[in-house]
Image: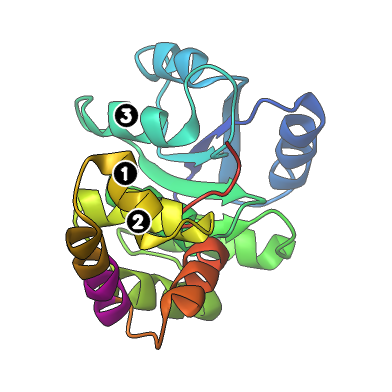
Amino acid sequence: MSDQIIHILIVDDHPVVRAGLASMLGTQRGIEVVGSASSGEEALAMLGSKHIDVILIDLRMPGMGGLETIRAIKLTKDPPRIVVLTSFDTDEDIYQAVGAGAHGYVMKNTSQDNLVDAIGMVHAGKRYFPTDIASRLTERMARSNLTSREHQILQLVAKGLTNKEIGHAFGISDKTARNHVNSIISKLEVSDRTEAATIAIRQGLVSIVD
């Protein structure tokens, strides 16, 4: 890491996490934690009052969530670089975070050295994705060509609905529902609807919770 000081803002709704990160990063040469925020709203309010180079942000927060906050930050003048630091690592979480504008994605159980490396690389204008996350992001991006309607139908496939039940839910014929399901199976490169549902749930493409 260069001699330049990297100014960090920590955004997480858990006080213990904020305090722990501030304490840990405060021991690192070249890093200064200039503030911490418990919400997206609070983070945005701080942007105008402090010089911030890199933001560490969680994805799941009450009120303005991480993705919404990232998108809002990207709309500000000369926005800081953004590293997602989270416990959530479904393929969809990663894909959505990158799509929103995150430059790095780090799990909370990572080592201190890896986190410092991520901060340094992102501050230098690069991106930081651990190998496993990078490979999953690549795979998820290859599966991103489902239409909005296909995503909706995949949700019902994951819940075990038949083509007839899916057709009834969307006001379409059984044949049209079957065609949508077949298209989903083809795009996901799986053998049947059961495998499509399994992959969709595992990768976070759908949720089976009502």
Q: Is residue 88 above or below residue 141?
A: above
Residue shown at 33% from the left, 48% from the top: 152
Q: Is residue 92 above or below residue 63?
A: below
Helix, strand, or loop for circle 3?
helix
Disc 3: which residue: 73
Disc 1: which residue: 168
Q: Nearer the viewer, residue 51 or 39?
A: 39
Helix, strand, or loop for circle 1?
helix
Highlighted magenta segment, given as a residue range: 181-187
Counting residues from the start of the chain, the first of labels 3 and 1 encountered is: 3
Magenta stretch: helix, strand or loop mostly: helix
Q: Quadrant of residue 81?
A: top left
Disc 2: which residue: 164
Number of other residues with Cα within 10 Å of mark 1, as a class: few under 14, some 14 to 19, many 20 or more: few
Q: Is residue 20 left or right of residue 194?
A: right
Residue shown at 44% from the left, 66% from the top: 128
